[in-house]
Image (cartoon, rainbow, N blue to C red):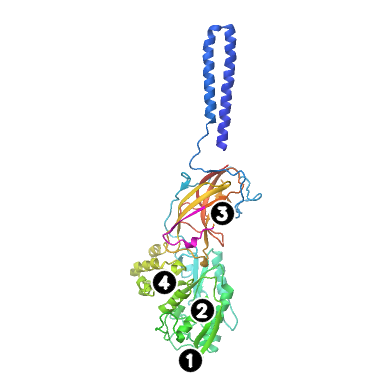
Amino acid sequence: MLASFGGDVWGSLLALGFALAATGLAGGVLYVMRRRPPYAAALGALLLATVLLTGFVVAAVEVPTATTAARTTVHHPTPAAPTSTTSTSAPASGAGTVPPAPEAPALPATPLTSGSVSPPGIDGYLPNPGIGYQGWTHAHGDLAQSTEYRRGEHPEQGGFDWATLNPAVDVFDWSPIDDFLQQCEARGEQGSFRIMTMTGAPYGTHRVPAWVVDDGAVITDSPDREPDYRSRTYQEHWGAFVDALARRYDGDPRIAFIDISGYGRFNEWQATATTDHGDVAGEADSIDSATRRHLVHMFVGGSGTARTLSDDGRTESALDYDHAGFQRTQLLMPYGGIWASTRYVAAHHPDVGFRNDALFSPHADLATLQQIGYGVTDIWRRAPVVFETVDGADPSRQAAAAETLRGMGASLLHDNTVLDEATLAELVPPLGYRYALDRVTTGPGPTGSLSVSTEWTNTGSAPSYPRMGQDLAVGIALADRRGRVVASWVQEAQVATWLPGESRVVAVDVPLPALPAGEYTVLIGMVERTTESRIELPVAGGRPDNWYPIGPISLS
């Protein structure tokens, strides 16, 4: 509009000049015809040429100038208010309006061709929430991490064990968990953890509180002094602790996931001397099978009657229970070799994810895990899958480990052995969701709106999981010449349903606020609805705030 206005003014002045010249020549011809007739014909010819030239200039000015394909002009005589909140990064004046900024160089962006652009992609690791790398602790990580993990077998893990957190009857010391989550939040990360009741060599003995042991919990005479998980006293008090844990932390957005614990060495659900190996799907009538179901119900919620072992270690007793469990926080079920419990959770609690702590060992080979059946290899479609490297990982098994991560749709790898950079560079980048922005098309929409179409492909190994905290949506924004976000919108696409390899098109008409006429930059991002933060995309040229400049548009 401004360019057209400038051309009209200068063309009009030029035409006016030629018209004045023609008028002067006409007067001259009349004068000469009276005083010097021989020169009248020549002056008449000059007058005719001037008139023709003047007409040509006027016609040229009236032809509209062509707009470049790199800009889309959107006319909005009566702009509507944006459907989402205008960014607070720029001072607002009135509803949906922003004061004009002083002239400044436009943001560098890929120019649009015919209103469409394919942003250049990038390779490499993206440390986005809920995916990628987990170091043994924050201080022991070789890669950037967004989701830290703690558990209770080692002092450096920070006291994540039952004995520390529940030192007396109805007394809970939540400070280790609270401190950990506050530290994660301060670093812009999430936390995840397992509360242990049993560790193992070389980290000592069980982690059952002394008062629970004094109250009659059965402790075996094994070298590790492992609890007898069938014990009625153990189940009563551990269930009360998990109930209190859920009341305090269920739905806490700082938590990515919690492991279901309470059984086996390191609470990895490894078999014990009393495990019922005849239990096929976790629904047998044995005391051990009933115990494992009860321990699961403590975390997922449920009621029933458990067969338990009395304090004398010989007679049975029935224990009625009713647990609220975690209904909003993501849970993971560790697999330590007991197919029955893994099958039970997969069949009855589809929102629970899968965890295995033996990557690089034959126990975690994809062919072995496929034998479990019951849809275990498809858990990634609805809940996250996490692996941990086995202690003393054999480098010769790296190819098998990579196959397991791909085949199981893993989102996170917990590095228990501090793998070398080359190994991490192969294993970690493909993990989890990875939303590639293939194409963006913009243009004028209905009156007062901007039409934006984005095309995406999930090139990762898994989708994102809202229950884990990654409730993502497509974000659109406009930035002024200073780079300030002056308007933004969130498109209500169900990003969590975008499975690996799938391509999706998201098209929307966004109503524009009353912005000053001029040039703006279209920004695209993937927004986390709860925190309003944005994840990293595999796209070149992103801003520090994870908005990605696509190209300029002109508003008039």
Of mark 3 and mark 1, the one earlier in the sequence is: 1
Which residue is more in the foreground, 180 or 356?
356
Circle 1 SS class: loop
Q: Amino acid at mark 1?
A: Gly
Q: Amino acid at mark 2?
A: His
Would you place residue 172 above or below residue 145 in this image? below
The residue under label 1 is: 313
User: Local crowd at mark 3 within 10 Å, few (<14), some, or many (≥20)?
Assistant: many
Distance CA(mark 2)–CA(mark 1): 23 Å
Percent x, y of residue 115: 48, 45
User: Local crowd at mark 4 within 10 Å, few (<14), some, or many (≥20)?
Assistant: few
Distance CA(mark 4)–CA(mark 3): 38 Å
Q: Amino acid at mark 3?
A: Trp
Q: Are marks 3 and 2 in contact (CB under 8 Å)?
A: no
The residue under label 2 is: 297
Of mark 4 and mark 1, the one earlier in the sequence is: 1
Q: Amino acid at mark 4?
A: Gly
Distance CA(mark 3)–CA(mark 1): 63 Å
Which residue is more in the foreground, 129 or 370?
370
Q: Residue furthest front?
A: 446
Percent x, y of residue 19: 58, 21
Image quadrant holding the N terminus, namely top right
Distance CA(mark 4)–CA(mark 1): 37 Å
Q: Are marks 4 and 3 in contact (CB under 8 Å)?
A: no
Q: Are marks 4 and 2 in contact (CB under 8 Å)?
A: no
**Disc 4 versus disc 2: nearer the observer:** 4
Image quadrant holding the C terminus, namely top right
> What is the magenta range?
492-507
Distance CA(mark 4)–CA(mark 2): 20 Å
The residue under label 4 is: 375
The residue under label 3 is: 489
